[in-house]
Amino acid sequence: MGVMTRWLNPDEQRTWRAFLTASRALMDTLDRELQRDAGMPHAYYEILVRLSETPERRLRMSDLAEATGSSRSRLSHAAARLEAAGWIHREECPTDRRGQLAVLTDAGFAALAAAAPGHVEGVRRHLFDALSPAQVDQLRRISETLADHLTGS
Amino acid sequence: MGVMTRWLNPDEQRTWRAFLTASRALMDTLDRELQRDAGMPHAYYEILVRLSETPERRLRMSDLAEATGSSRSRLSHAAARLEAAGWIHREECPTDRRGQLAVLTDAGFAALAAAAPGHVEGVRRHLFDALSPAQVDQLRRISETLADHLTGS
DNA sequence: GCGGTTTAGTTGAGCGTTCAACCAGTACGG
DNA sequence: CCGTACTGGTTGAACGCTCAACTAAACCGC
């Protein structure tokens, strides 16, 4: 309090609004496409992807939450839905009796395999096709910087 | 169908994941701060901002939806909440009997004025402080390109 | 071992968003 | 004019997320 607010200058203002518009439009579009074509929101798609990338197609709930950048609570609710859909099931963790493992089922893997081509095509069309290689590189550096900045503090 | 999927190469993969992580972390952080400090989600803050920028502090529901990048339905629900909070009220549109005007109340303006400094500080801390001036410029160009690409098609 | 703290995960209520259905009111084609 | 299509906006149900409260198990110091 008492400290002067460092307001945004016109360039920053413009950047911030453009970023808001673009990222929201991008995520909304991809989310809607995934919901329409695969019957799952983007957050659930990401969960299935992470599970599919592990050797045994299974992860501790906490690690999965970390990997997908979501809260424990969110993941717990999501896991309940995914389990009801038959795409994952839960197992006891052998090394920690508090723990739960989320395991990708064959049906889950199939759902992911069916959804992936369309979704990747969407990411390419809506994001990468619009940017030059230099811009893709810039976006990567900016995003990595921001991610460090946000999770590191 | 039958067309080969254009999968993401490693650089694109890395860029896409970094973007997802960063933009989600940024928006989640700002949303949480705004909810904690001002009792409103970021989407509602944006609505109040747009209204405050018009000469008469009022906008047609459709224009407001357009400006904030939201669906009519979403805006309608949001307006109901904002009206219940006493931050806006609705008026009949004089030129189109179907239309509704959302009007920012004095209480709404006060709530916005109270929320703005903290929120702007958050945007600066979490976004602009982490980036070089050149990166801010790059982010602006990338975002504007994407916004055009997404809303133009 | 025993009590206090931390960690893992779940649960339920409340909120915001989406989607589809719907009711006006306006515009258009004859 | 009259019917049809379109536009502006609202509504309710279903869904996903957040937050706070909670249970259970592990850790930690002594």
Image (tube, coloured by chain):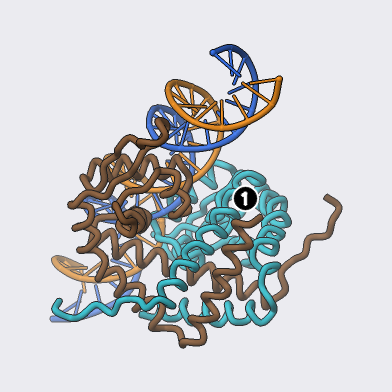
Chain colours: A brown, B cyan, C blue, D orange
Q: Residues within 10 Å of mark 1 (few under 14, many from 20)?
A: many
Q: Is residue C25 above or below residue B147?
A: above
Q: Residue B5 appears in which quarter of the rendering?
A: bottom left
Question: Which residue lies at the image location 32% right of the left edge and 73% below the top edge?
Answer: A122
Where, quadrant-wise, is the C terminus of chain B in this rendering?
bottom left
Image location of residue B15, percent across then percent down: 47, 73
Foreground: A80 or A104?
A: A104
Question: Which residue lies at the image location 47% right of the left edge and 60% below the top edge?
Answer: B61
Question: Which residue lies at the image location 60% right of the left edge and 55% below the top edge?
Answer: B30
Foreground: C14 or B6?
A: B6
Q: Secondary structure at mark 1?
A: helix
Q: Is residue A119 visible?
A: yes
Foreground: B96 or D17?
A: D17
Q: Is residue A151 left or right of residue A35?
A: right
Image location of residue A126, percent across then percent down: 37, 76
Image location of residue A137, percent across then percent down: 51, 81
Residue corresponding to mark 1: B34
